Amino acid sequence: EAGVAQSPRYKIIEKRQSVAFWCNPISGHATLYWYQQILGQGPKLLIQFQNNGVVDDSQLPKDRFSAERLKGVDSTLKIQPAKLEDSAVYLCASHLGGLSDTQYFGPGTRLTVL
Amino acid sequence: GQSLEQPSEVTAVEGAIVQINCTYQTSGFYGLSWYQQHDGGAPTFLSYNALDGLEETGRFSSFLSRSDSYGYLLLQELQMKDSASYFCAMRYSRGQNFVFGPGTRLSVLP
């Protein structure tokens, strides 16, 4: 089966610009996560969707970050305006749900804010 | 809230056995997962423990003690390709909510 797809793989922007990331999860996976991973740290959850509803966005900086998952399939994460500290890898993961234990991660988008 | 602790770095030689520990604090606990991440790559799932005891998958084993809020990943017959970062991740709700630890960087020396 196809894995989790993400684009773009790399993005360089200047501070105060906006940027958007796209994720297409594994077909049939109801749960989708966006994580931020700063170099040398573990992934930090930004937002979790169950189908097209938000389950947890408690750590999403809502003044600048937004995310949506229309039709419960693919998802976009947007940053507007970007700050220097947003430089990180943005990982999308999907989860089948139920008794499954596994999150499947996409390759990530490496964002550099100058 | 939830938090996990792991050693930041571990070094071992090829062919050896290494144990990576993880302790956690949480108000709700459903299980502990382990993920491997090579530099520049995505995390990949290794194992999951929901109950106390040892789970073995090839050269990798994972252990959980819920009473001690503690788990570990055991890697046997280390190979150079095992050099990577290893993360424990705690499932703290029925709704597939996870929090990741800070990661342990494993270096395997020849």
Image (cartoon, coloured by chain):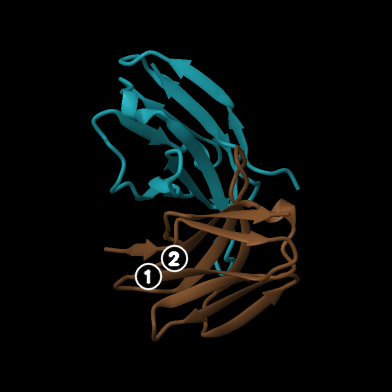
Disc 1 + disc 2, Cβ < 8 Å: yes
Q: Which mark is residue B90?
A: 2
Compared across the picture, whether A10 is left or right of A41 comes to: right
- Which class describes the residues within 10 Å of circle 2: few (<14), some (14-19), or many (20+)? many
Chain A shade: cyan
Identify the image quadrant of residue A74.
Answer: top right
Residue at the (51%, 20%) spot, across then down:
A11
Residue toward you, B106 or A102? B106
Q: Amino acid at mark 1?
A: Tyr
Kindly identify the residue that appears in the image at 26 percent across and 63 percent down.
Answer: B1
- Which residue position holds label 1? B24
As measured in the structure, the alpha-carbon distance from the residue carrying label 1 to the one carrying label 2 is 8 Å
State the residue in front, A102 or A97: A102
Three-letter residue code for mark 2? Met
Placement of B44 over or under B33, stated as above or below: above
Q: Is residue B72 left or right of residue A13?
A: right
Q: Position of residue A7 (x, y in %)?
A: 58, 27
Q: Colour of chain B?
A: brown
Count neighbours of disc 1 (C-alpha within 10 A) and say few if under 14, some if 14 to 19, many if 20 or more. Answer: many
Q: Is residue A103 visible?
A: no
Outermost residue toward the left in this view: A63
Is B81 on the left-hand or right-hand side of A102?
right
In the image, A49 versus A111, the foreground residue is A111
Q: Tell me the residue at 32%/70% (across/down).
A: B25
The picture places residue B91, in percent across and down from the top left corner, at 44, 66
